Amino acid sequence: MTKRVFIIHGWEGSPQEGWFPWLKKKLEAEGVEVHVPAMPDPAHPTIDTWVPFLKHVVGRADEQTFMVGHSIGCQAILRYLETLPAGVKVGGVVLVAGWVTLKPVAMEDEEAAAVATPWLERPLNWPKIRSHFENLTAIMSDDDQYVPVEAGKLFVRELGAKLVIEHQKRHLGGEDGVMVLTSVVKSLKGMMNQ
């Protein structure tokens, strides 16, 4: 059965951003089916549009399904996993610069605060999310301008994540010049070969 990877971009992101095209090409060269959907209204992401959209794009999730998210795309994945029926598992999850808390600088502008607040305040059901995968890696940067490294430690505590710290790669996106992210490939390959 073919392995499928879904790469979910972040707020104001796109499928062509940063390391997504590089990762897609690298995985496809190894026979993996890769989807990088353009999420709806990326300038104003909402839980109520992104999660159903992701559910539609993925279709039937199973242990050959792997999820990779960047920034708010990580939360979309976690909230999507929360909606899966009991007993359904995906093969693995990689969260890159994922957040459930933000540094104050990320909330300085009123429009940004209006978008981020529901994602920050709507609780996550950690045990339910955890029941839908065996492997999760959280990749954080030690100088992320928006997300504290402590967010990665929360994923370790609540989701049993393996934590990878990148050095001086800011928010790990295209806007920071990150066009290649080998730690994502390494994490996925580890999950796929188990």
Image: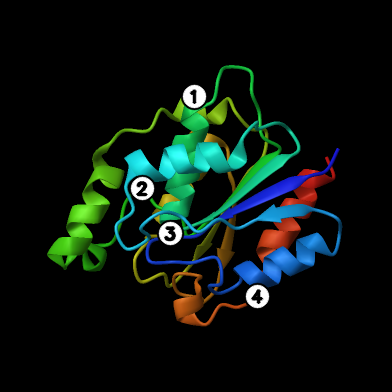
Answer whether residue 182 is visible to the viewer in this image.
no
Type of amino acid at the residue the image marks with label 1 = Lys
- Residue receiving disc 4: 180
Q: Earlier in the sequence, mark 2 or mark 1?
A: 2
The picture places residue 128, in percent across and down from the top left corner, at: 49, 24
Q: Which of marks 1 and 3 is nearer the N terminus?
A: 1
> What is the spatial separation of the Cα atoms under label 1 and label 4, in whole angstroms?
32 Å
> What is the spatial separation of the Cα atoms under label 2 and label 4, in whole angstroms?
25 Å
The answer to whether 95 appears left or right of 99 in the picture is right
- Residue receiving disc 2: 100
Image mark for residue 149? 3
**Callout 1 secondary element:** helix
> What is the spatial separation of the Cα atoms under label 2 and label 3, in whole angstroms?
11 Å
Instruction: Give the crowd class for mark 4: few <14, some 14-19, many >=20 residues within 10 Å.
Output: some
- Callout 3 touching callout 4 (CB < 8 Å): no
Camera-side residue: 82 or 24? 24
Q: Which of marks 2 and 3 is nearer the N terminus?
A: 2
Q: Earlier in the sequence, mark 2 or mark 4?
A: 2
> What is the spatial separation of the Cα atoms under label 3 and label 4, in whole angstroms?
21 Å
Q: How many marks?
A: 4
- Residue receiving disc 1: 128
